[in-house]
Amino acid sequence: MATPTLDKTDGTAKPEAGFADSPFITATFRIRRFNPEVSDEVQWQDFQIEIDPKERVLDALHKIKWELDGTLTFRRSCAHGICGSDAMRINGKNRLACKTLIKDINPEKPIMVEAIKGLTVLKDLVVDMDPFFQAYHDVMPFLITKGNEPTRERLQSPEDRERFDDTTKCILCAACTSSCPVFWNDGQYFGPAAIVNAHRFIFDSRDEAGEQRLEILNDRDGVWRCRTTFNCTDACPRGIEVTKAIQEVKRALITRRF
Ligand code: SF4
Ligand code: F3S
Ligand code: FES
């Protein structure tokens, strides 16, 4: 495929003439393209752009889409690491495009960008998230109590709140699940994100459905499929100790104490 280029010296965002300390560099983004409406073939396409390396990969993708190829397809919403919609593989590692600075990923070489693994690619960088959200749905990610409607807020000690603090930070980006080799091998495994979200309620002292959630994760496709490879912890853009949370759920299944 031809290499479209965007020369910023010809564009509207032109650096000032004679500005010797221009922050712009020429970076090549090598993007894995797939459009089932055009071809069943996957192909890598290079785009060269001039960009400030302090900008983020998401900024580069916007520049490519808006100025070079409007057909490039990817998800994003908040652009600030909150919505979890722009997880992708960047130089072989799962990251959020909006949290990845170009200067941190060696822009002297082509920057490889592709869809996350283990989920069906629908187009370019967009995958089918349905199996991921089905597993999330299956662990009942909401507070469950049995008929004791409170007349005021449900109290919880700071210590009890601390037990699941880490797992409340999940933004459902799927970077963990789609970095897990067990999930790649067969998409049946619940995956680390679903377990993290089960953990968030299992260890919540106000919740009364911990046993039910543990039984769901005791399934053959549940928590025992985890081989403690830590890819999920490495991939999590929120710094959640995903593997530790999975271990805590395994321990709760054995001891029935949570
Ligand atoms: Fe994303 Fe981390 Fe949540 Fe996994 S645990 S979905 S990597 S935020
Ligand atoms: Fe997979 Fe994480 Fe376990 S990468 S094998 S869920 S530790
Ligand atoms: Fe929302 Fe990146 S666009 S997390």
Image: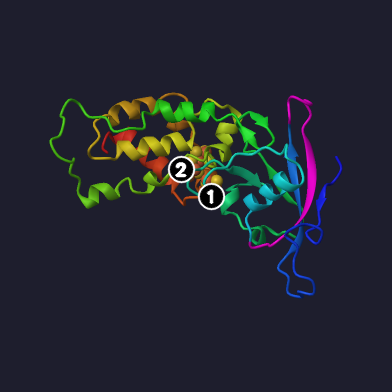
Of circles 1 and 2, which is in front?
Answer: 2
> Residue 22's x, y, as percent?
73, 70
Pick whichever, 108 or 240, lies toward us: 108
- Kindly identify which numbered label has been placed on residue 87: none
Q: Quick check: 237 left or right of 116?
A: left
- Kindly identify which numbered label has been placed on residue 171: 2
Which residue type carries mark 1?
Asp
Q: Residues within 10 Å of mark 1 (few under 14, many from 20)?
A: some
Quarter occupied by the C terminus = top left
At x 84%, y 46%, the residue is 3
At x 48%, y 29%, the residue is 133
**Label 2 CB less than 8 angstroms from ligand 1:** yes
Which residue type carries mark 2?
Ile
Q: Quadrant of residue 74?
A: top right
Q: CA distance from mark 1 to mark 2?
A: 15 Å
Q: Quadrant of residue 186?
A: top right
Pick whichever, 116 or 79, lies toward us: 79
- Kindly identify which numbered label has been placed on residue 234: 1
Q: Is residue 91 within the magenta segment? A: no
Q: Is residue 51 within the magenta segment? A: yes
Q: Residues within 10 Å of mark 2 (few under 14, many from 20)?
A: some
Q: Quick check: 80 left or right of 62?
A: left
Magenta stretch? 35-54
